[in-house]
Image (cartoon, rainbow, N blue to C red):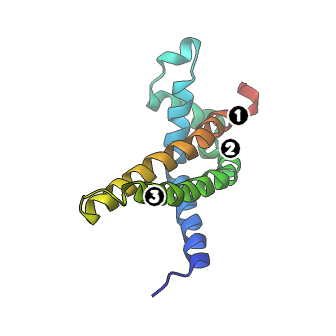
């Protein structure tokens, strides 16, 4: 049968948000380590984690998550739209080629994933960097 797109998108957004919430502390640590300057460059992930929890509590590991989660919605929309467009375009370009349909599908999915990830990351990564820091440390 056909998929109920509304349910699919609502469940997808919910699951994506749950996964993002689970992984956000790791992403926060990674981002802070990538943009560290001065003596902070030499801090390892465990030391940074201890410092954040000591100064801000567990809530400090989620500082900026609400904004990042909300701000990522356009990135997810870009991903889904670009995925479908790039898959269809790749399929059209390969339609006259004498290769198996399974190969065409695999290539179209690969190109679609590559292009859609690139487009969505061009939006999402700068947003993650901006909101990984509390306003007091900028």
- How far apart in space, not on screen, are marks 2 and 1 (Cα)? 8 Å
Q: Earlier in the sequence, mark 2 or mark 3?
A: 2
Q: Nearer the viewer, residue 100 or 106?
A: 100
Q: Earlier in the sequence, mark 3 or mark 1?
A: 3
| Label number found at residue 64 | 2
Q: Are marks 2 and 1 in contact (CB under 8 Å)?
A: yes
**Label 3 Cα neighbours within 10 Å, binned few <14 / some 14-19 / many ≥20:** many
Secondary structure, mark 1, is loop
| Label number found at residue 124 | none
Q: Nearer the viewer, residue 14 or 8?
A: 8
At x 62% / y 50%, what residue is drawn? 75
Q: Earlier in the sequence, mark 2 or mark 1?
A: 2
**Label 1 Cα neighbours within 10 Å, binned few <14 / some 14-19 / many ≥20:** few
For residue 54, above or below residue 69: above
| Label number found at residue 134 | 1
The residue at which mark 3 appears reads as 87
1 left or right of 66 in image: left
For residue 44, above or below residue 4: above
Q: Nearer the viewer, residue 68 or 24?
A: 68
């Amino acid at each position: 049968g056909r998929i109920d797109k509304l349910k699919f998108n609502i469940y997808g957004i919910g699951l994506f948000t749950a996964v993002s919430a689970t992984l956000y502390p790791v992403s926060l640590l990674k981002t802070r380590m990538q943009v560290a300057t001065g003596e902070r460059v030499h801090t390892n992930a465990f030391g940074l984690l201890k410092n954040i929890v000591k100064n801000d509590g567990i809530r400090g590991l989620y500082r900026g998550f609400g904004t990042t989660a909300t701000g990522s919605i356009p990135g997810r929309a870009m991903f889904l739209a670009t995925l479908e467009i790039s898959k269809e375009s790749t399929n059209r370009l390969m339609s006259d080629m004498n290769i198996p349909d399974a190969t065409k599908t695999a290539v179209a999915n690969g190109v679609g994933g590559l292009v859609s990830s690139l487009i969505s990351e061009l939006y999402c990564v700068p947003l993650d960097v901006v909101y990984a820091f509390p306003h007091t440390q900028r």
